[in-house]
Amino acid sequence: NVQNLPIDIQTSKLLDWLVDRRHCSLKWQSAVMAIREKINAAIQDMPENEEIKQLLSGSYAEKVIYSVIADIHYFHCLRIVEILKGTEASSKNIFGRYSSQRMKDWQEIVSLYEKDNAYLAELASLLNRNVSYEGPALRKQVTKAQQLQQELSRKEVECQSGASDMRERYYTSCKQYGIAGENVARELQSLVKDLPTVLEDIGKQAACLEQAVQLYTAFTDFVCDWSEPVLPMLSFVQRKGNTTVYEWRTGSAPTVIERPVVEEAPLDTVTEETIDWGDLSSGAGAEDVNFGITVEDGVDWGITLESGKEERSADGIDWGESGDGTIEIEVVDAGTDCPEGVARGEDALSLLECPQKRSQFIDELMELELFLCQRLSEMSEEGDMVAMSQFQLAPSVIQAQTSQRVQAMLADVRRLLEGLTSLRMQHLFMIQASARYVERVSDMLRQKLKQADILLLKRTSLAERRQEALEEQAKLEPRIDLLAARTKELQKLIEADISKRYNKRPVNLMGVHV
């Protein structure tokens, strides 16, 4: 039975299907535009009715009610006419017509819609727009908001991890320096106060190297016939400990030690890099610049001129007394200007505090270490008859050594080297040598904390943006649901209208999905 066969129409082809079958005119758009103008004029004068307000607000997604409304269609107009029959009942005459202009305007709009079935073409256009454009656009915005949330969440985790990593690196660096990290500058400066005690302990530990030094001295004398002193600095420290440079240089202990006074740099020290010298080349003359020097009766340069022997050149510079030009220079040895028995300046420092002497001590330790390593390697080789014959005439201190004793000597040497060349000791020596090193280390450590704080601020900003994207998604999802409900409503209205034109045959609009 043909009457029971459904009519399947693709939604994207619905409008063409209606025009091809002469249900709608080809020029329906111009007719609908004229109808829209009349709706815009008629909607400006509407009675105060709650149902009309809900109808209009629902059709325009809660925007301004009394304005040009694109979503009002034919069936809305029919409902408005039904409502006006109740509100405008007093204007109805005996012939069943209404004298109210409102009713006339809306009845005219309905009749224009029904002319050439313009309303059906408009409904098909609205349905196609919802399915092909409005729905996908909203879905795309929701997907974009979800992707943005995922990306921002990932970046939040990265920022949090980066901030934790920077703080971990900060405390790791502080641990390497041997400080807690609460007040970096003061803690670094306080470390230097314990440095003399640490170096004194290292000097005492050097006493255990006596056998190693004797072995190396005897070995060099036997093999190389070496006549010069071997490991002089190491031998001296091994015998007398970490004494002053004065005692190392003169051979006698000082009676008075005047250590150089080193002032601790404040936390916020103004260095040369931060001094604002101003623009010295700007138009001001030399007489306008105050360099902080007060001159009363001239500067005393320590030059005395006898009367009658002043000779000045044309530019007014006094070159001194003219004569044969002989200049006598007296060379004064370091420390000779100090009284006997007084250690002053560098002489007052201990051997391991003085950078040059400490470097010499470390070099001799490394030299002894290499010798012991080589000697241990030679002793581990068995069956070398040539080596055994060579050492038959060696001193007893060489022949009496065993691998275990050499290994113990090597362990003592390496322990001393580790104590002097560890990363912490290197930092302590740098802090002692330069006050600006404290500033550089403090700035470097503070920079890590600053980067951690920046990452946390960035994480907060990302969290705010993610919340905004979440709110945007929350606004879009109800609009999608509302659009889907209206699309289903349009689908049912169109299917029912077309079905009436084909003797109640079932009509199916295909591809209606928002």
Image (cartoon, rainbow, N blue to C red):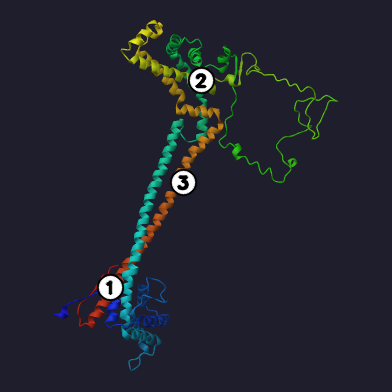
Foreground pick, 125 / 242: 125
Could you tell me which residue is drawn at 76 percent across and 31 percent down?
A: 299
Residue 275: give x, y in percent of width and height. 62, 39
Foreground pick, 237 / 387: 387
Residue 302: give x, y in percent of width and height. 75, 25
The type of residue carrying mark 1 is Thr
Q: Which element type, helix, strand or loop, lies under badge 1?
A: helix
Residue 115, by quadrant, is bottom left
- Marks 1/2: CA–CA distance: 93 Å
Count neighbours of disc 1 (C-alpha within 10 A) and say few if under 14, some if 14 to 19, many if 20 or more. Answer: many
**Left or right for 472, reference 323:** left
Could you tell me which residue is drawn at 80 percent across and 34 percent down?
A: 316
**Residue wearing tag 2:** 360
Q: Nearer the viewer, mark 3 or mark 2?
A: 2
Could you tell me which residue is drawn at 72 percent across and 39 percent down?
A: 290
Counting residues from the start of the chain, the first of labels 1 and 3 encountered is: 1
Query: Which numbered tag is attached to residue 11?
Result: 1
**Residue wearing tag 3:** 454
* Visible residue check, residue 201: no
Residue 486, by quadrant, is bottom left
**Above or below, 132 relative to 405:** below
Foreground pick, 124 / 460: 124
